[in-house]
Image (cartoon, rainbow, N blue to C red):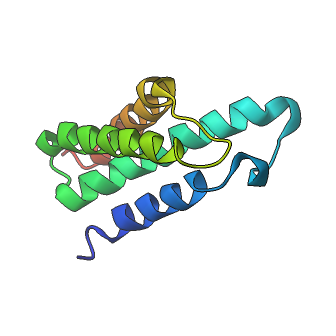
Amino acid sequence: MHRWGPAVLIMVGIFVLSSRASTELPVFGIWDYLVKKGGHVVGYGLLALAYWRGLGPERGKRPVAWVLAICYALTDEIHQAFVPGRYSSLLDVLLFDNLGAILGLMLWERIVMGKRKP
């Protein structure tokens, strides 16, 4: 279970944050869009990495981790449709969540796993 702990914690964190009504969300002025969409990128990058860790960090499992992250992103967008003042956005999944998952997995493989090669 310890291999999947980070993934579970990140999923709970995403669920809790996306459960907040729009009136409860902080506003970051002119930076609001960038901060919130950046949160998608970072959150789903970390989630994809946590899935990869849970599956086992072999390179062949990276696509499975990506698919799991996108599937969770889709369920989160459906969940948001039921939160007051929030809405579902396929753009969030296809662009921001997807970008985060891909970048997280690619950067980890190049930076960390690349150093492990003899």
State left or right for residue 58 relative to residue 13. Answer: left
- The residue under the point 25% across, 51% down is 52
How many dots with numbers?
0
- The residue under the point 74% across, 50% down is 25
The location of residue 71, given as percent across then percent down, is: 30, 41
- The residue under the point 27% across, 67% down is 4
> Is residue 114 visible to us here?
no
Quadrant, the N terminus: bottom left
| Pick the front one: 62 or 89 | 89
State left or right for residue 94 relative to residue 18. Answer: left
The location of residue 85, given as percent across then percent down, is: 68, 42
Quadrant in which residue 64 is drawn: top left
Outermost residue toward the left?
60
The location of residue 11, given as percent across then percent down, is: 42, 59
| Pick the front one: 84 or 29 | 84
- The residue under the point 35% across, 50% down is 49
The location of residue 62, given as percent across then percent down, is: 21, 41
> Is residue 117 visible to us here?
yes
Outermost residue toward the bottom?
1
State left or right for residue 72 relative to residue 89. Answer: left
